[in-house]
């Protein structure tokens, strides 16, 4: 019986300073990186000429390197501007794609800036209220306490005539 040689599966693959599960398909493994969604991962796979349906642990080191480059510098790889998550950065004025801890840091800085300049969103952040226009009558009850329901006055019969 002829032996079929399967490619050796690496159980941990490191892309963009993040350890990924080698058993997952490439698209969904890449989407585990903070700042990379499924659509961005799909575009990176196309640019790097890697099959997105293949297990990421079965990819060669060269393919993983291509993916890493495409994710770290998407504009150089040829991805369109609208796919980036930080277009026209307020500090530098450039378009860039921010990943992992840098993404969390930039979000925190944006919120601090909104609070400092007292924008509507910044004030809502300060008060712990919803920022994106949701209604607050029945949800977001953290500051209001538990819902009490209808109270029946003492001495009256519940639901009957007196």
Image (cartoon, rainbow, N blue to C red):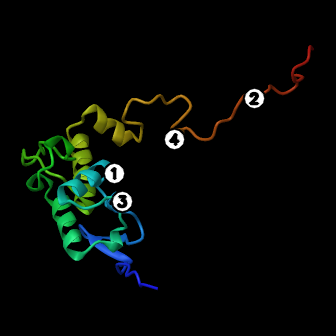
Task: Residue 126 in the image: state x and y as whole percent.
Answer: 34, 42
Q: Tell me where residue 32 sits by quadrant.
A: bottom left
Q: Which residue is mark 2?
A: 151
CA gap between label 3 and label 1 equals: 12 Å
Crowding around mark 3 (Cα neighbors within 10 Å: few <14, some 14 to 19, many 20+) is few
Which of discs 3 and 2 lies nearer the camera? The answer is: 3
Q: Which residue is mark 1?
A: 38
Image mark for residue 143: 4
Up the image or down, 150 lies above or below 108; here it is: above
Q: Tell me where residue 44 sits by quadrant.
A: bottom left
Instruction: Report the front residue among 103 and 127.
Output: 103
Instruction: Report the front residue among 36 and 45.
Output: 45
Residue under the image location 25 percent in, 62 percent down = 50
Residue under the image location 22 percent in, 53 percent down = 106
Up the image or down, 140 lies above or below 99; here it is: above
Q: Are marks 4 and 1 in contact (CB under 8 Å)?
A: no
Q: Which residue is mark 3?
A: 53
Crowding around mark 2 (Cα neighbors within 10 Å: few <14, some 14 to 19, many 20+) is few
Task: Residue 87 in the image: state x and y as whole percent.
Answer: 15, 43
> Which of the marked residues, 2 or 4, is nearer the chain's N terminus?
4
> Which of the marked residues, 3 or 2, is nearer the chain's N terminus?
3
């Amino acid at each position: 019986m002829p032996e079929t040689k399967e490619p050796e599966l690496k159980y941990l693959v490191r892309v963009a300073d993040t350890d990924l599960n080698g058993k997952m398909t490439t698209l969904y493994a890449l989407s585990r990186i903070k700042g990379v969604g499924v659509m961005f991962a799909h575009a990176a796979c196309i640019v790097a000429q890697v099959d997105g349906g293949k297990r990421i642990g079965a990819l060669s080191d060269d393919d993983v390197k291509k993916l890493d480059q495409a994710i770290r510098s998407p504009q150089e790889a040829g991805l369109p501007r609208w796919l980036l998550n930080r277009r026209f950065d307020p500090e530098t004025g450039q378009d860039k794609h921010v990943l992992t801890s840098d993404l969390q840091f930039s979000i925190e800085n944006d919120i601090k800036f909104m609070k400092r300049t007292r924008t509507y969103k910044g004030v809502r952040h300060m008060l712990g209220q919803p920022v994106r226009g949701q209604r607050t009558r029945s949800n977001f009850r953290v500051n209001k306490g538990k819902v009490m329901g209808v109270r029946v006055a003492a001495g009256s019969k519940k639901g009957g005539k007196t």
